Image (cartoon, grey):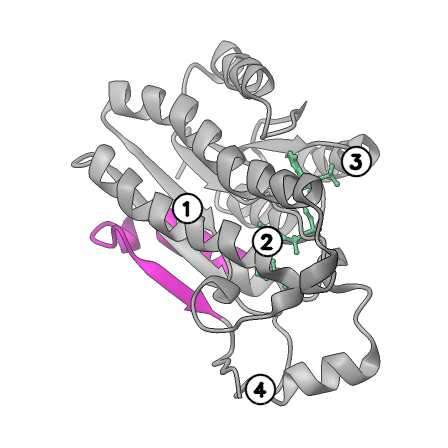
Amino acid sequence: MKDLVALVTGSSRGIGKSIVIELAKVGINVVINYNKNESKALELENYIKKNYDVSVLSIKCDVSKEEEVINMVNTITDNFGKIDILVNNAGICNDSTFFDKSVKNFKRIIDVNLIGTYLCSKYVGQIMKKNKQGKIVNISSSNAIDSYYPESLDYDVSKAGVISLTHNMAVEFAPYINVNCICPGWIKTDMNKDLSIDQIEKEKSKILLNRFGSALEIAKVVVFLVSSKASYINDSIIKVDGGRYNG
Ligand SMILES: NC(=O)c1ccc[n+]([C@@H]2O[C@H](COP(=O)([O-])OP(=O)(O)OC[C@H]3O[C@@H](n4cnc5c(N)ncnc54)[C@H](OP(=O)(O)O)[C@@H]3O)[C@@H](O)[C@H]2O)c1
């Protein structure tokens, strides 16, 4: 997969970081995107430089801000001339009880998770459409399909929006660009670091594999989806959740 260029949004930590490493492992040039965690992004950039024979670049960009997304995409094309792979991974959550949710926080979650996915797809998609090639992977959540938590309803609806966006993008970008969506279940990252042991045990009991997943187990599916092995997979919503049910 030499000479390919991938942008992974929200890749200073967690699932995005693992995706960057797995893409670099198979020889894909990678762009790390972060919003706040510059030191973690630079740490990852150095790790990639030391360990893999690919080009790497880190860019600060809040994916919910259109001007910042335009600047990020321009910086990538100035450096690499193209973008072949986009992984819309940046995401936030902010759990609280149903009645405590503020409109401000609700909108912020929609802005980052849904509008951010749209904006990156809009500006990267233009380049892919012109080049008549590309792969886009959106990271949604199994919370968007069949596991509902009123505490995270703002997050859940933003991720349901990402599924609808995926279907619409697959139509818009046909026939040259594959657009797919991964819906992870519980994955061990900072996003879940505040769960109590009791909550973890309760959630594990609803997973057929009886454990949380790792960031690597999501990253491997991304690498598969952007490879030639997945050339006929398009407009698909793929749950990677160990078999989770809302029992
Ligand atoms: N962990 C799970 O159980 C789970 C389950 C289902 C789906 N997901 C989804 O998987 C994706 C990654 O989650 P994670 O668990 O790896 O989360 P995480 O560990 O909290 O990492 C989130 C990443 O997103 C970046 N980010 C946040 N806001 C951003 C913004 N406005 N613009 C650009 N980047 C931004 C963060 O960068 P900075 O630190 O630099 O701000 C960080 O790199 C998210 O979309 C999440 O919803 C996670």
Within 10 Å of the Cα at label 2, are there few (<14), some (14-19), or many (20+) other Cα atoms? many
At 66% from the left and 48% from the top, the residue drawn is 92
Residue at numbered disc 1: 137
Residue at numbered disc 3: 37
Mark 3 or mark 4, which has the lower sequence index?
A: 3
Within 10 Å of the Cα at label 4, are there few (<14), some (14-19), or many (20+) other Cα atoms? some
Q: CA distance from mark 1 to mark 2?
A: 22 Å
Circle 2 or circle 3, nearest the eye = 2
At 70% from the left and 66% from the top, the residue drawn is 188
Mark 4 or mark 1, which has the lower sequence index?
A: 1
**Residue 206 shows which numbered tag?**
4
Q: Residue furthest top?
A: 78
* Label 2 SS: helix
Ligand 1 contact, mark 3 (Cβ < 8 Å): yes
Amino acid at pointer 3 = Asn
Mark 3 or mark 1, which has the lower sequence index?
A: 3
Residue at numbered disc 2: 154
Above or below, 79 against 240 in this view is above
Q: Residue furthest front?
A: 99
State the quadrant of the N terminus. top left
Above or below, 85 against 222 in this view is above
- Left-right relation of 126 to 208: left
Q: Is residue 236 visible?
A: yes
Above or below, 146 against 5 in this view is below
Q: Quadrant of residue 197?
A: bottom right
